[in-house]
Amino acid sequence: QVRLEESGGGLVQAGESLRLSCVGSGRTFSRDAMGWFRQVYGKEREFVAGIAGVGTRKNYADSVKGRFTISRDDAKNSVTLEMNSLKPEDTAVYYCAAFTTTRTTAVVTTAGGYDTWGQGTQVTVSL
């Protein structure tokens, strides 16, 4: 019953923007560390952005820093990833994840650190 569902992916041209949403159900995620990851087929899932469950700490992969913004809306039990100035190398399936076992001020940056995952949403950036 505890679920995360991503939405907002699609096909865009380089330089354009997308806004991904991750809505939780079956649990209040407002105090859980949340993260966005992306994965290309055949490659390891990589960290994109994360936000702490307690406090305001955020962290971003170097490849997206300055272009992507992670935020949360507790009223909607959701986390958003705003993606600007998209590049073809941003093409991947994007997943949201939650670390629910411990309340922490830290940003979890490893996939293995998360226990709850969404199904993913495809983002494709063309030239």
Image (tube, rainbow, N blue to C red):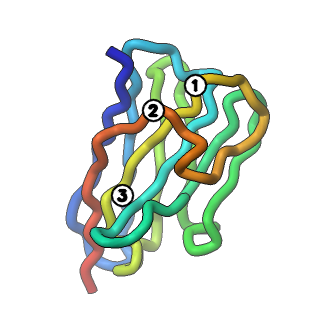
At x 71%, y 23%, the residue is 103
Q: To which quarter of the image does residue 104 belong?
A: top right
Q: Please, is residue 70 above or below residue 84 in the view?
A: above
In the rendering, at what x and y percent does residue 59 appear? Answer: 69, 54
Residue under label 1: 100
**In the image, what residue occupies the spot 32% across and 34% down?**
5
Give the Cα separation between the discs numbered 2 and 1: 8 Å
| The C terminus sits in image quarter | bottom left
Q: Identity of the amino acid at label 1?
A: Thr
Identify the element where label 3 is drawn: strand
| Mark closer to the observer (2, 3) | 2
Residue most extreme to the bottom: 127
Provide the residue designation for mark 2.
116
Looking at the image, do the residues carrying marks 2 and 3 touch, with CB atoms under 8 Å apart? no
Q: Is residue 52 left or right of residue 55?
A: left
Q: Amino acid at mark 2?
A: Thr
The dot on residue 51 is: none
Is disc 2 in contact with disc 1, using a CB cutoff of under 8 Å? yes
Query: In the rendered structure, are the residues bearing label 3 and label 1 in contact, judged by CB atoms less than 8 Å apart?
Result: no
- x, y percent for residue 121: 27, 50
Q: CA distance from mark 2 to mark 3?
A: 23 Å
Of the residues under marks 2 and 1, which one precedes in the sequence? 1
- Residue located at (40% from left, 24% from top): 24
Look at the picture and state if 88 lies above or below 120: below
Q: Quadrant of the N terminus?
A: top left
Relative depth, front residue between 105 and 21: 105
Residue type at tag 3: Leu
Checking the image for residue 18, the label placed there is: 3
Pointer 3 or 1: first along the chain: 3
